[in-house]
Image: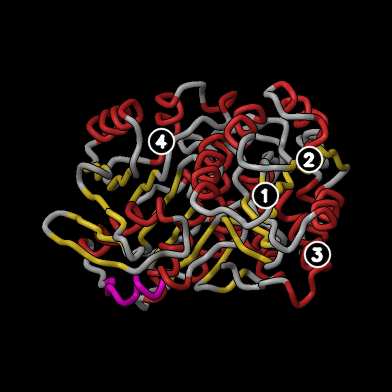
């Protein structure tokens, strides 16, 4: 590719794919060096960074939506995407255009010189480039992996939000909750404010120590703020001497209390966040693939959960509703995930399993999932293996009655492929708006 001339977006993404999107080399040195070359100015933007094992994307989306509903400009960075790379970089509610992305990629390519950047580092810098051009009031940034050495952490957060702590990426982040908390707590910098959602005693102690060492005020759920769900589904939120009653949310309710705490801290910085703006965001914000209902008769749900903590939340949601008929699952996973841990939590939730292989180096084979379920007592006749998510979805649809329920889960890759297939097959039956 001619480095002096940006190509089409497809060409840029193919160029970046040659780096290998799955290659992980944590560390801030390369990103900081290119940032210096780019000489970006974010003005007086308030930077909010969001780390955690689960709930990052939903928390970021709710923060961004509320800030915009309150009349402020906001830039949102999340990963991974489901269908289009443009989903990752959102400026005032609008996904970055192909032309904007090409410009940003060209700027990063020129600034890096001969310095190697991973796919995530390159794309994160592109997001920073576009955000600086738009001079927003707020940057809402999702950490990709961990926190301390993640590329997003090259910027210093004014407010650091930790959504959850669970075992995931253990070969990179550590094999205990305390080790993982330390890595995710790396986004807490001197001069910042820190908000930590409900977590166990071990991680809470880690965050408390980090904040004490760095002179940071810590707001811990259950100690400094709390929320109780009412019988009508509304949320009663308490922070300091204030109590607020809020409508049910469309994002997972476990994400909401810490997000509201962040918004209260933003108000302490002199911004005005009316309750009407928060209510509007709660009622409107929903991310695809987070328990998303996409069809009726049979009901079909999409859930990108891919680790034990997410599987536990999914199992709890499933226990609260029962279909009239059977419950089927289409599941495919990546080989670097805790396959056995996830399946152990979901094994009793479904009547039939449609297991699918996923592509690429990280894609796990359906047969491994099958063997893991057999080892845990599932009968072979309940376990069906397929080459890809589309074939598994086709078989599940063919085997389902209108009174049954189908859940697609296990990976962003599984859900994205299944969603493409379902859109093509269901036509007008597909429920386009996440519900």
**Which residue does the image show at 79% across and 74% down from the upper left?**
427
In the picture of the structure, the residue carrying the numbered disc 4 is: 186
Give the mark toward the camera: 4 or 1. 1
Quarter occupied by the N terminus = bottom right
In the picture of the structure, the residue carrying the numbered disc 3 is: 7
Dot 4, crowdedness within 10 Å: few (<14), some or many (≥20)? some
> Mark 1: which secondary structure?
strand
Q: Earlier in the sequence, mark 2 or mark 4?
A: 4
Cα separation, mark 1 vs mark 2, equals: 14 Å
- Identify the residue at the far left of this view: 241
In the picture of the structure, the residue carrying the numbered disc 1 is: 327
Give the mark toward the camera: 4 or 3. 4
Cα separation, mark 3 vs mark 2, equals: 39 Å
> Mark 3: which secondary structure?
loop
Cα separation, mark 4 vs mark 1, equals: 41 Å
- In the picture provided, is 319 more to the left or to the right than 106? left
Give the mark toward the camera: 1 or 3. 1
């Amino acid at each position: 590719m001619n480095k002096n001339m940006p190509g089409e977006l497809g060409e840029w993404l193919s160029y970046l794919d040659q780096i290998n999107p799955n290659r992980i080399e944590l560390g801030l040195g390369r990103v900081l060096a290119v940032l210096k070359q780019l000489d970006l100015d974010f003005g007086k933007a308030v930077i909010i960074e969001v780390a955690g094992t689960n709930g990052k994307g939903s928390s970021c989306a709710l923060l961004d939506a509320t800030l915009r509903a309150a009349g402020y400009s906001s830039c949102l960075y999340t990963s991974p995407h489901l269908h289009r790379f443009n989903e990752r970089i959102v400026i005032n509610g609008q996904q970055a255009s192909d032309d904007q992305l090409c410009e940003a990629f060209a700027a990063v390519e020129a600034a890096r010189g001969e310095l190697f950047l991973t796919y995530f580092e390159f794309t994160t810098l592109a997001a920073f480039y576009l955000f600086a051009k738009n001079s927003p009031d707020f940057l809402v940034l999702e950490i990709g992996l961990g926190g301390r050495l993640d590329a997003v952490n090259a910027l210093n957060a004014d407010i650091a939000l930790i959504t959850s702590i669970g075992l995931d990426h253990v070969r990179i982040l550590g094999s205990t909750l305390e080790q993982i908390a330390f890595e995710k707590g790396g986004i807490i910098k001197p001069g910042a404010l820190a908000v930590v959602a409900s977590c166990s005693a071990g991680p809470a102690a880690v965050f408390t120590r980090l904040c004490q060492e760095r002179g940071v005020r810590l707001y811990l759920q259950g100690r400094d703020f709390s929320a109780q769900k009412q019988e009508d589904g509304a949320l009663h939120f308490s922070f300091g001497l204030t109590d607020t009653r809020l409508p049910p949310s469309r994002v997972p309710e476990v994400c909401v209390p810490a997000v509201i705490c962040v918004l209260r801290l933003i108000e302490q910085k002199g911004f005005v966040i009316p309750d009407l703006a928060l209510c509007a965001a709660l009622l409107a914000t929903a991310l695809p693939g987070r328990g998303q209902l996409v069809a009726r008769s049979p009901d079909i749900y999409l859930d990108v959960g891919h680790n034990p903590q997410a599987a536990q939340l999914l199992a709890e949601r499933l226990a609260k509703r029962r279909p009239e008929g059977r419950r089927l699952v289409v599941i495919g996973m990546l080989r670097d995930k805790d396959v056995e841990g996830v399946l152990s939590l979901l094994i009793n939730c479904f009547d039939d399993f449609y297991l699918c292989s996923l592509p690429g180096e990280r894609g796990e084979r359906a047969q491994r999932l099958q063997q893991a379920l057999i080892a845990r007592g599932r009968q072979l006749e309940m376990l069906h293996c397929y080459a890809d998510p589309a074939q598994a979805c086709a078989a599940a649809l063919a085997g389902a009655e209108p009174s049954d329920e189908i859940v697609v889960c296990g990976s962003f890759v599984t859900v994205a492929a299944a969603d493409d297939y379902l859109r093509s097959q269901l036509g007008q039956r597909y429920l386009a708006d996440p519900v």
